[in-house]
Image (cartoon, rainbow, N blue to C red):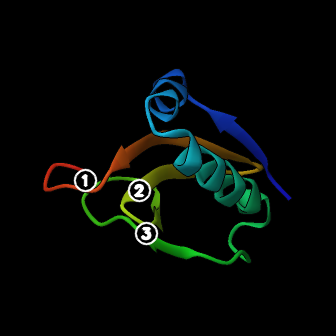
Amino acid sequence: MSAINWTRKAAKQLRKIPSNYQKRIVTAVSELVNFPNCKGDIKKLVNRDGYRLRLGNYRIIFDDIGTIIEIQEVKKRDNRTY
C-alpha cells in the first residue's frame, strides 16, 4: 500500500486537460496505490528516473519513493513527452 502525492506541476497540468480525461486519469492514478501489483500499461523510464503510466494519448510520469507514489507530470503524448 502506498500513498499518492501530486506535485504542484502535475496538478496544474491535470487541470488543463479536458474533464472527461481528468476523471480517467484520477481513477488510473488511484489504482497505483497497489504499485507494483496494479493493472495498466506501466513501464520504467530509461532516460530518467521513474515510471510512466500510459492512458490513451496521455502519459502520467511518476516515481516510487518507498511508501509514496509521487505524480510528477501529466502530459499529452507527443515527441517531447519524455
Q: Earlier in the sequence, mark 2 or mark 1?
A: 2
Question: Which residue is label 1 attached to?
Answer: 82
Few, some or many residues within 10 Å of mark 3 (<14, 14–19, 20+): some
Q: Are marks 2 and 1 in contact (CB under 8 Å)?
A: yes
Question: Which residue is label 3 attached to?
Answer: 44
Q: Quadrant of residue 38?
A: bottom right
Query: 45 left or right of 62?
Result: left
The residue drawn where x is 62% and y is 33% is 6
Measure how far apart labels 2 and 1 are at the Cα level. Answer: 9 Å
Find residue 8 and report its horizontal and vertical position in percent: 53, 21
Find residue 54 and report its horizontal and vertical position in percent: 45, 66
Q: Earlier in the sequence, mark 2 or mark 3?
A: 3
Question: Which residue is label 2 attached to?
Answer: 59
- Quarter of the figure with the N terminus: bottom right
Measure how far apart labels 2 and 3 are at the Cα level. Answer: 13 Å
Find residue 23 and report its horizontal and vertical position in percent: 65, 48
The residue drawn where x is 29% and y is 66% is 46
Q: Nearer the viewer, residue 28 or 69?
A: 28
